[in-house]
């Protein structure tokens, strides 16, 4: 099976490349705007900017993949709110270009989406929940989903929640790494305790994508961790795991932060469908911290 990955230099993309490179019978093509670090010898790389339609069509046509795993996106929520044209170009126009390319090559699309398409009035949510985004990032990701659902290609949409993990070239942080670094530096931090999520280990999301790709699964799947926690809970658990000073962590209400983009208060996912149909088995949050710790040490 030939699998092409977009966004190969992001956190998920990196984990996907490492995972697919270790699978027998998988030929992996990694694409991104720049070459990722630690690219396995067996994995080909081609430069790709998904906002460039001719390039997207050309790269995918020449690769002739059986499956495209579309992990490239603009995911910085506040930046999406303030740079709307850039956000729409990446998260909607980019998806349109991928759809066109998949239609021409008859490739199955596995598209990665987000819990931020929901308003956060209740959770955890299953795949039948009605989207109602409260920020522009969510709007753009929902628009991308709709383009896929209205297309005639073969597709699966994998929504996820608050992804954490580590890569050798960690250009962007995530909540676990930020908490760990801040506490190691002796900084006092304020972390929200009135938002609820099911945090997702990057390796688990990559495995979910691989399972969906290998089965050419169709439809919408919720792929995340299984534990509903607040960012404050995550921070305290991280401090305890790494033997850091949890007294430096102060609980805070979301209203104390001024951010350009609103956050949905309560999302989190019910992952029963992915467990049943894909054989998806996420790590617990503590197990996820252990995976991350071993990689940092290595």
Image: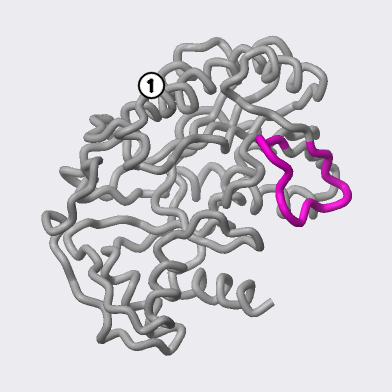
The residue at 35%/26% (across/down) is 84
Q: Nearer the viewer, residue 201 or 258?
A: 258
The residue at 21%/42% (across/down) is 262
State how the image is colored.
one colour
Q: Is residue 37 magenta?
A: yes
Q: Is residue 196 magenta?
A: no
| Magenta-colored segment: predominant secondary structure | loop
- In the rendered view, tell whether residue 177 sits above or below residue 157: below
The single residue placed furthest to the right in the displayed view is 41
- In the rendered view, tell whether residue 216 sits above or below residue 57: below
Q: Quadrant of residue 188?
A: bottom left
- Check the picture and name the quadrant holding the C terminus: bottom right
For label 1, the residue is: 143
**Residue 49 position in % (x across, y down):** 63, 27
- Check the picture and name the quadrant holding the N terminus: top right
**Is 105 on the left-hand or right-hand side of 165?**
right
The residue at 51%/69% (across/down) is 288
The magenta segment: 31-45
**Residue 275 position in % (x across, y down):** 50, 50
Q: Quadrant of residue 187?
A: bottom left
**Is 96 on the left-hand or right-hand side of 246?**
right
Query: Callout 1: helix, strand or loop?
Result: helix
Mark 1 crowd level (few <14, some 14–19, many ≥20, 10 Å Cα): some
**Residue 215 position in % (x across, y down):** 66, 36
């Amino acid at each position: 099976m030939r699998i092409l990955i977009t966004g190969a230099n992001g956190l998920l993309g990196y984990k996907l490349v490492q995972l697919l490179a270790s699978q027998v019978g998988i030929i992996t093509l990694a694409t991104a705007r720049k070459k990722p670090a630690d690219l396995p010898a067996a994995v080909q790389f081609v430069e790709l900017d998904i906002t460039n339609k001719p390039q997207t069509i050309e790269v995918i046509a020449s690769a002739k993949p059986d499956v495209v795993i579309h992990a490239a996106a603009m995911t910085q929520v506040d930046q999406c709110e303030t740079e709307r044209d850039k956000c729409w170009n990446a998260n909607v126009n980019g998806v349109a270009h991928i759809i066109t390319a998949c239609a021409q090559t008859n490739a199955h699309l596995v598209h990665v989406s987000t819990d931020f398409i929901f308003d956060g009035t209740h959770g955890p949510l299953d795949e039948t929940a009605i989207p109602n985004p409260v920020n522009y990032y969510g709007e753009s990701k929902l628009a991308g989903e709709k383009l896929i659902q209205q297309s005639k290609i073969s597709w699966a949409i994998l929504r996820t929640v608050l992804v954490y993990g580590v890569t050798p070239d960690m250009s962007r942080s995530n909540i676990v790494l930020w908490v760990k670094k801040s506490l190691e530096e002796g900084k006092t931090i304020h972390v929200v305790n009135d938002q609820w999520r099911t945090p997702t280990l990057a390796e688990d999301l990559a495995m979910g994508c691989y399972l969906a790709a290998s089965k050419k699964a169709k439809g919408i799947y919720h792929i995340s961790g299984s534990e509903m926690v607040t960012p404050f809970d995550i921070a305290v658990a991280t401090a305890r795991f790494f033997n850091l000073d949890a007294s430096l962590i102060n609980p805070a209400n979301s209203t104390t932060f001024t951010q350009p983009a609103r956050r949905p208060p309560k999302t989190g996912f019910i992952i029963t469908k992915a467990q049943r149909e894909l054989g998806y088995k996420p790590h617990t949050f503590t197990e996820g911290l252990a995976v991350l710790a071993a990689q940092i040490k290595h």
